[in-house]
Amino acid sequence: MTVPTTRPKKTAAVLLAIAAPAVVFAMYMALIWAPDERTLGTVQRIFYIHVGSAWNAYLAFLIVFVTSIGYLLRRRPALDAVAASAAEIGILFTTLTLATGSFWARAVWNVWWTWDPRLTTTLIMWFMYIAYLLVRAAAEGEERRGRLAAVFGIAAFATVPLVHFSATWWRGMHPNIVQFQGGTPRMNMDPEMIVTMLVAVAALTLVNAALLAYRVDLEHLSRRVALLRERVRLEVES
Amino acid sequence: MSWARALAAIVWKDLRLEWRTGEAVLTPALLALLLLLVIVFALPPAAARLEGVFTASLWTAVFFAGTVGLGRSFARERAEGRLWGLLLAPVDRSAIFLAKGLSAFLFLAMVALVTMPAFFAVFGQRLEAPLWLWTATVGLVLLAYSGVGTLVSAVAAQLRAGDVLYPVLLFPLLVPVVLAAVHLTDALLETGGWGTARSWVHLLIMYNLLFWGVPYLIFEYVVEV
């Protein structure tokens, strides 16, 4: 049995070195530089982190979806490792989205939670990927775990467009900033706010990438440990 | 053996097995009726006549009772290597998924047929909508339920403690179907038609296409031995 060597951690470190100052800069723009919202005031600044987290939750789950399809077709353990890592990061960003949304709702709607379509579907998406991790935890054998998780990861992605389009389909109370008029996107926002939002999204995407790189390295390490342990066990027994 | 004959053979096998054991229809139906009792006793007496309570009770019972039968759909095939027998058959594996889904749908429909009249009777609810519209709505809901349920059942059957995990894995995927069922039922009871709840029918159709179509394509990966 050969034990594969792990890749050097350079990618992760480089990504972190870019992501950290980017986040500081995005926070400066979101908290200080961007103008106050006319009616909501300073509370609206949660919006930048909220949108950034939501976008990255989608992105992480898209990575789960794509690598799951790839794993079923190619059977490369590395793809499974990326899917497992991205699912955890997606749950993290969904949790952040729900938490920041909840703070905003407390300030603006005067409730911590309401059963608005977008909130409800986001919560479903959160449960969905918790279930994905349960599948991973309960499957025995690396091949079977990868295969069943991939099947579930593909099915789970059905909840993502549901979250995204819920606000337009069912007209809840969740604000819908980007609206489409005859195919062209129109943002009901101050230009400075749009820039801040884009910077926040970009910065959190870098965080997403750095986390993913670290988490994938960790996954490879843990698989290596498992293989080494197995080898030791075989040697002790023989 | 042709694809259609393989499909029919598996459905026929499931129906015969059900006739002899009663575990996919009788047990869930009994559970649904027991849930009806529990719900009625748990509600304050006046609440049973409130709007929406009937809908909530009906679908809570049907969805939860359904997991008992659906969860066994593939777990049953694990015993004595029956799944091996199915996989060794020289037919496209999509036939196995469609057959299991179809028999799951038939079982759910039978459970609904047996238990739903009891719910109408106990809550004193009258059905204003035409019967065909009600049947079509319930049919769409149960079809989506059996599609999702069969896929998750195939995954859960291969997991450690899959029986226990089954409902936890199933319900996140099923919540949109539950929402559609509740909204459509309320609309049918109030107005006698789908009315403004029509968008939920679209969601159900989309869900059906998705969860019958995708497993159809990837099923051979689900049941590899």
Image (cartoon, coloured by chain):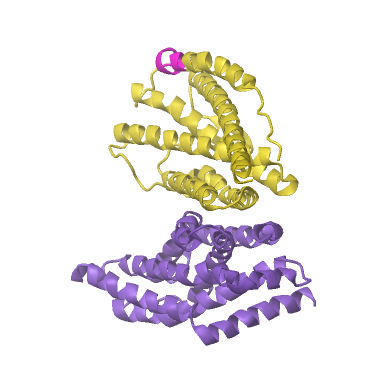
Chain colours: A yellow, B purple
Q: Residue at x 65, y 28 (%)?
A: A6
Q: Is residue A216 above or below residue A148?
A: above
- Looking at the rendering, the stretch of residues picked out in magenta corresponds to A27-35
Which quadrant of the rendered structure holds the C terminus of chain A? top right
The residue closer to the viewer here, A150 or A109, is A150
Answer whether residue A205 is visible to the viewer in this image.
yes
Residue B117 at what x, y percent from top left? 39, 81
The residue at the far left in this view is B45
Query: Where residue A200 sits in the image (x, y, percent)?
Result: 51, 22
**Does residue A7 lie above or below B219 as drawn?**
above
Name the quadrant of the N terminus of chain A: top right
Q: Nearer the viewer, residue A58 or A75?
A: A75
SS assignment for the magenta stretch, majority = helix
Quadrant in which residue A36 is drawn: top left
Residue A230 appears at what percent x and percent y?
60, 42
Q: Residue at x 67, y 26 (%)?
A: A7
Q: Is residue B64 left or right of residue A9?
A: left
- Look at the picture and state if B106 lies above or below A144: below
Which residue shows up at 43% across the image and 72% down it? B192
Residue A176 visible within the image: no
Q: Is residue B187 left or right of residue A204?
A: left
